[in-house]
Amino acid sequence: MRLRFFPTIEFLFVLISVALILPGVALAHGTGYRVLQQDKAVTLECYYSDGTAMAYAETYIYSPEDAELEHQNGRTDKNGRIAFFPDTPGTWLVEVSDGMGHKIQGRVQVQPEQTQESAPKTATRDQNPKALSKPLSAVLGISLIFNLCMGVLLVRRNKTA
C-alpha cells in the first residue's frame, strides 16, 4: 500500500470552497468608536470589536472647512482615547489607524455652542481693565517706600524729644 503525500483534487476544491464561503470566520476583528464627551472638547474612545482599546493608534482629525489638511494629528493614548477642540461647527472627520490594517473613519457633529470661538475668553494681565499700568505701578511703589521712610523718621524724632 502506498501513502499519498499530496491531497486529491477533490479535497483541494472543497478546502478552497469553504475558505471562500466563510471569510468571516477569520481571526481578524473589527473596530469601533464612541463619543465619551462632547462639550468644548470632543473626546472619543476607539476600540476593537473584542473590547480592547486601540492603544497608540495614529489619528487624523479634519475640520468641516478643510478635508485635505488635518486640523490635528497624533496618537490615541493607552486607553484608545483622543480629544480635540473644534473651532468651527459642522461635521468633523476622525480617522484612526493602528498600522496593521484596522481603520476607523468616524464623523462627529459639532454644534455652534461647542466651538472654541464661543468659549469665554480668559483675561490676561494686560487685558484686565483693573490692572495698573507699569509707570503708575512704579510711582505708587516709590511713594510707598517714601511714606514708610517718613514714618520711621517721625517715630525716631518723637522718641528723642
Image (cartoon, rainbow, N blue to C red):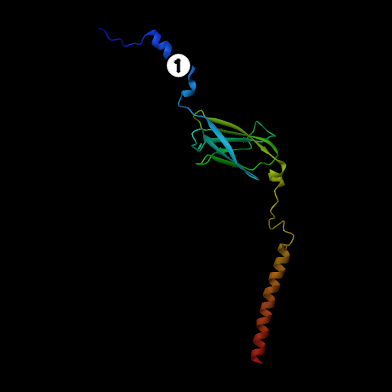
Q: Which residue is located at x 64 percent, y 90 percent?
A: 159
Q: Residue furthest bottom?
A: 161
Q: Residue at x 55, y 41 (%)?
A: 81
Could you tell me which quadrant the C terminus lies in?
bottom right
Q: Residue furthest right?
A: 129
Secondary structure category for the residue under label 1: helix
- Viewed as shown, does residue 36 lie left or right of 56? right
Q: Quadrant of residue 137?
A: bottom right
What percent of the width, then of the height, locates residue 48?
A: 51, 33
**Percent x, y for residue 15?**
42, 14
In the picture, measured across the screen, residue 49 lies left or right of residue 13, that is right
Q: Tell me where residue 111 sits by quadrant.
A: top right
For this orientation, the residue located farthest to the left is 1
In the rendered view, tell whether residue 143 sits above or below residue 128.
Answer: below
Which quarter of the figure has residue 108?
Answer: top right
Relative to 24, 116 lies left or right: right
User: Total number of numbered labels?
Assistant: 1
Q: Position of residue 77 (x, y in %)?
A: 52, 41
- Which amino acid type is marked by label 1? Val
127 versus 117 height, above or below: below
Disc 1: which residue: 18
